Image (tube, rainbow, N blue to C red):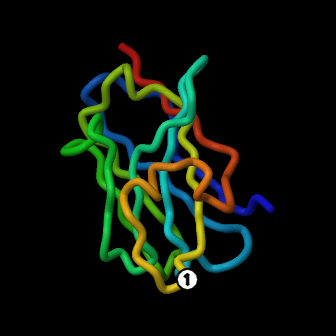
Amino acid sequence: QEHLIESGGGLVHPGDSLRISCTSSGPTLSHSNIGWFRQAPGKERDFVAGISHNAAYTHYADSVKGRFSISRDYAKNTIYLQMNNLKPEDTAIYYCGAFDANGLVYSTSYYQYYGSYEHWGQGTQVTVSS
């Protein structure tokens, strides 16, 4: 059952910044590990960033390291992806996914695998163009 909601996408210029959000219409996300993925037209859904349920661990794709930052606000039940120095190749639909932490620590590869996630949102479009 999908209950994640992404927001904050839009059209920006190269070099601009944008922050997108992921929240839940149902259960709290405080016990969930969260991942951001993106999918460009004609391409597969690729991992972008992930954060553990307790925010102790974050994971990033090499293509966004140093430019993107993932964080979470428990009071707002929201996970953010801050994207700086955006490039045209960042253009895609961005999706957030969630899977239960179950008290375990998961590897980066687990976050990177699309099939690890139990819930998905509908996505938000990010377009970077001059």
Which of the image's four quarters has the C terminus?
Answer: top left
Residue occupying image coordinates x 67% and y 62%: 118
Residue 74 or 115: which is nearer the viewer? 115
Vertical position of residue 73 compared to residue 107: above or below: below
Q: Position of residue 2 (x, y in %)?
A: 76, 58
- Location of residue 41 with respect to 3 vertically, above or below: above
Tell me what residue is drawn at x 32 percent, y 63 percent: 58
3 left or right, relative to 108: right
Residue closer to the observer: 33 or 3: 33
**Residue shown at the point (46%, 58%) measured from the top left:** 110
Vertical placement of residue 120 versus 24, above or below: above
Secondary structure at badge 1 equals loop
The quadrant holding residue 26 is bottom right
Instruction: Assign the N terminus to one quadrant of the image.
Output: bottom right
> Closest to the observer: 112 or 119?
112
Position of residue 65 measured from the top left corner of the image (x, y, whole percent): 23, 44
- Tag 1: Cα neighbours inside 10 Å, few (<14), some, or many (≥20)? few
The residue indicated by pointer 1 is 102
Image side of residue 120 versus residue 104, left or right:
right
